[in-house]
Image (cartoon, rainbow, N blue to C red):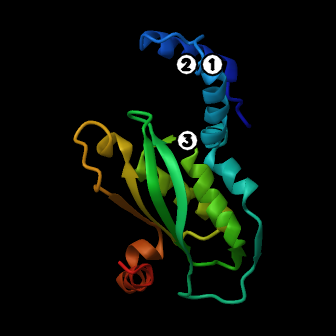
Amino acid sequence: MKKEIDQAAIEAHIRGILEALGDDPDREGLGETPARVARMYSEVFEGMRYTNKEIAEMFGKTFEAEWQGEDFVLVKDIEAFSYCEHHMALMYNMKISVAYIPDGKVLGLSKIARIADMACRRLQLQERIGADIAEIMELASGSGDVAVIIRANHSCMTARGIKKPSAETSTVTLRGRFRDDTALQNRLFMQLGS
């Protein structure tokens, strides 16, 4: 069941944060900021309104596959962003690659990008994004053979704390044959250019 995002509460809290920072939330330039942030949060955190199962149902339109075996579908370098749950800091320059072996049916390619996008629209950890996308793909496609590779920069590392602007984080989530079959992994990583 879809959960609603409480924009009025977000506005009140953002107003409080501005006051806690020592600024005047009523001054010119900030007067509409709490409402703007509330609208932005409703958009960038839309994925928090749905479970993985609900996302799979939303984007689970499939077509009959005309082949079986080791052939896989790969959608490479889906651009996305998310927010780290530890600092609410931006994860940016994110590139997500998703592969799966169809099991009698295939997903529309745009659905794979929509699944990745919706999984990112939550307070997240990069590792969980990969696991969420893999789970949603399994539910939507009916295939247990899924791989998700993510590369991203984290502003909690690049803009604060250790301040290493060139640091990039990579995560690999493998399910089914992608996890167990080294030859299949090698084919996948060759396609990814890794």
Q: If you read the primary sequence from the N terminus, does the residue marked by circle 3 or circle 2 appear first?
A: 2
Q: Secondary structure at mark 2?
A: helix
Determine the residue positioned at 63% across, 19% down. 11
- Residue 145, position in %: x, y? 52, 72
Query: What amino acid does circle 1 point to?
Result: Glu
State the SS at label 1: helix
Percent x, y of residue 39: 67, 31
Q: Nearer the viewer, residue 156 or 146?
A: 156
The foreground one among 111 and 18 is 18
Q: Position of residue 92 (x, y in %)?
A: 45, 51
Which residue shows up at 49% across the image and 63% down it? 96
In the rendered structure, the answer to whether residue 184 lies left or right of residue 144 reads left
Could you say which quadrant of the image residue 79 lies in?
A: bottom right
- Residue 118: numbered disc: none
Q: Residues within 10 Å of mark 3 (few under 14, many from 20)?
A: many
What's the amino acid at mark 2?
Ile
Say whether residue 78 is left or right of residue 189: right
Q: Is residue 108 above or below residue 90?
A: below
Q: Residues within 10 Å of mark 1 (few under 14, many from 20)?
A: some
The percent position of residue 7, horizontal first and vertical second, equals 68, 23
Give the label, 3 or 1, closer to the camera: 1
Q: Tell me the distance, in whole angstroms, between the alpha carbons under discs 3 and 1.
A: 19 Å
Q: Which residue is mark 2?
A: 14
Answer whether labels 3 and 1 touch (C-beta < 8 Å).
Answer: no
Give the residue at mark 1: 11
Q: Residues within 10 Å of mark 2 (few under 14, many from 20)?
A: some
Check the image and report above or below for 109 versus 44: below
The quarter of the picture where the N terminus appears is: top right
Discs 1, 2 touching: Cβ within 8 Å: yes
Q: Amino acid at mark 3?
A: Arg
Q: Which mark is residue 122?
A: 3
Q: Residue at x 58, y 12 (%)?
A: 27
